[in-house]
Amino acid sequence: MSAAHPILNTPQAEAVAHVNGPLLVFAGAGSGKTRVITYRIVNLVAEHRVAPYRILAVTFTNKAAGEMRDRLSRILGPGGEAIAKDLWVGTFHATCAKLLRRFGGSIGLPRDFVIYDTQDQRAVVSRVLKELDFDEKRYPPRTVLGRIHKEKQEGRGPDEMEAGDYVDDVVVKIFRKYEEHLHRAGAVDFEDLIGRTVKLVEDPDSEDAKTIRRRFQYVLVDEFQDTNRMQYRLVKALASETQNLCVVGDDDQSIYRWRGADIRNIRNFRRDFANAKVVKLEQNYRSTKRIVSAALGVISPSREREPKELWTDNEDGIPIDVVAARDEHDEAAFVTRSISDARAEGTSLREMAVFYRIHAQSRVLEEALRVANVPYQIVGGMKFYERAEVKDALSYLRVLVNPQSDVDFLRIVNVPARGIGQTSIERLTAFASSRGLQVHDALAKLDEATDVPTAAKKKLAGLRDLLEDFCAFERQHAASDVLDRILEKTGYRDALKNEDSAEADARLENLAELIGSIRDYEAEMQAAGEKGSLSGFLERVSLQSDTDQMEEEGRVTLMTVHSAKGLEFERVILTGMEEEMFPYRGMDPGGEEELEEERRLAYVAITRARKHLALTHTSMRQIFGTTRWGRPSRFIGDLPAESIVQKATRSASQRPQQSYVERARETRDYAPMPSWFQKKQPTVQRAAGERYVDKEFFADTSAGSEGGDSESGELRRGARVLHSRFGEGEVRRIEASSEPAAVVFFPGWGEKKVLARFLRLA
DNA sequence: AGCGCATCCATTTTT
DNA sequence: TGGATGCGCT
């Protein structure tokens, strides 16, 4: 192999050459992580003659899986496609689904189980709330579902939850019913895919478990810092026979704690596998020295990190712009101007990106870009498979495959409108539960449903006949034709055509696209010599919610920092770099852990840029209908002085009443530094690497000391304190957690637990 | 069934 | 500020 990869540096080669036993790779941003994974697989197959189907590589997104597969077949060259096809490369969820389709029977899972997405899950919770007669206001389905998932992510069911501390009985009840519903519907949620597979594979006595564990000789996990508890358990179990578990990740890029990622998985890997080989990839091939040093400036204050230092051999590059703007409009004008300029100088719009912390920031940016005629695309937003018409169509198809699925049946029972009103539906479901039937099955026993009015029965019978027809048709025809027939015979298409609006046309197009994607799937399967089934298509859809059209030509990309992870751009503008915005602070003050994650998020943002990076901050910003006055983010204060250059837009110091266009024109040339700005520049000569210390201009960079004058010692019971959001309140008691905090009574808000650093004495 | 008005609420996202 | 949602009316 050695001749094939002279392109690997020493640690990369080390990771590739390591064959047997656990391996932990810390892969810094831009350090060639994917390269290592792919070459490692190539090495196993080509050099060590490992059968491709005995190698499992797990990723988090379909996109990552797809890229890995592509790269593998490219490296393997002609003839390698067959090998790439045999490898198990997929997301956690897809891999589990595959195993459960094959072996799920032994743990009581029906062959044709459906996968409920978030909307479906929420519908189940809503229904459970109604059945149990709980108030949706008091128990918002969203929140309850969040709690349920948290339990499931830790491997707990309702029973285990009930046995735990601090339990809300109501949530346990809802949880239990939720599980029952899924079970009866022959459905699983995303957590189940992982959890059930863990159960399946961990079973010491089951033959299936043994088969699976022996099957995978080598297991690789990408983005290991994003794994949650159950995912870790899963890969451990899968690799338990051979211990050939290779995990790749970067603790500095762990930004998904809030959705269950457990950073301890990567931090404690060496404890769990005492003989693990550890490799650190620290050379960055992506960014200029200045950008790398900026990234280091931001991440270094982080408390618990694996010791490592990113470095690069690349050129110094140009300084990073730190731009002061007056408000978000001024900021947007700068962004627009700067993009137009770069474009005029020949940088493709595809190579530029604008990041923000939260989606709400995108609107103003969009407006400015639109006015200036700069093409842009926004990542995130309504996904194709989440659109109402697409979900309707899919529900019809899923009912054919699995009639037990109540969520799907209830979705389509009156779509398009066929005169089955809410009351009829309620009576029907009531009848179904009284007989212990799923709603669809209740259709067959309609005669016995005394509560359902005759008129409704007639219409329900009509639906039943339709479904039967589709079912018969499905046995003889391709899935794409089935959907076509459904849209035709139910009158779905006609209903949209009659609407004759632009919106309806868009929906029709989406449906046509859906049929097209089924055809694509069928063609693809045929090319692979397999038969594309309806259920096969549905599975693919459930596990792949986004149509990855990220590659759109000639557009600037606008996105949150979260969605930027894993990407890179020539030019990046990071907006909204103010305290409260980034690090973000929402309703609850947030603790040290949250702040650490924000820091890592900033690190991720900075390391996306190859050559040009600008950070913008405003002194004033309208967000959620109120005006906030902000100070530059502490993360700006963490940037090394010699890597940045400070600028201010003209209106940052003046207050012109101007239009967007005029402002955009004005900001073409940077105004001289406004006087207040210059006054606050540190006057001392800074040594290389020294940080800005101007506390008045920059936010304090030492975490936890914001607000300054509120040591916990001064806080005592009865003290009057001020909070930026809740106003004046009275301290009820002091609470020591990871840092000093107090429970304060705020008139009009009630008791709130607040960290001491967010309080000032009144 | 479908519309209009009021009200409430506010990260980050994948599968 | 705006979107999502819910309610009541027609």
Image: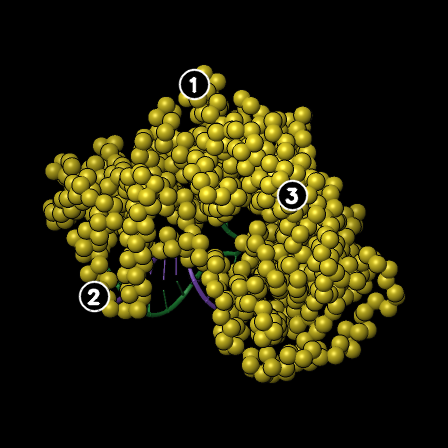
Chain colours: A yellow, B green, C purple
Q: CA distance from mark 3 to mark 1?
A: 45 Å
Task: Tell me if label 2 and label 1 are in contact, CB under 8 Å.
Answer: no
Tell which circle, 3 or 1, labels the residue nearer the N-terminal end: 3
Q: Which mark is residue A6?
A: 3
Asked if one can make out residue A736 in the rendered structure from this viewpoint, the answer is: no
Few, some or many residues within 10 Å of mark 2 (<14, 14–19, 20+): few
Q: Within 10 Å of the Cα at label 1, are there few (<14), some (14-19), or many (20+) other Cα atoms?
A: few
Q: Quadrant of residue A500?
A: bottom left
- Please provide percent x and percent y for residue A54: 48, 29
Can residue A105 be seen here?
yes
Cβ atoms at labels 3 and 1 below 8 Å apart: no
Q: Earlier in the sequence, mark 2 or mark 1?
A: 1
Q: Chain of mark 2?
A: A
| Side (left or right) of A434 relative to A659 | left
Q: Are marks 3 and 1 on the same chain?
A: yes
Q: Position of residue A420 (x, y in %)?
A: 19, 51
Above or below residue A91? Residue C2 is below
What is the x, y in percent for residue A647? 72, 72
Circle 3: residue type: Pro
Looking at the image, which is closer to me, A119 or A611? A611
Which residue is denoted by mark 1 in the rendering?
A206
Q: Amino acid at mark 1?
A: Ser
Residue located at (17% from left, 43% from top): A473
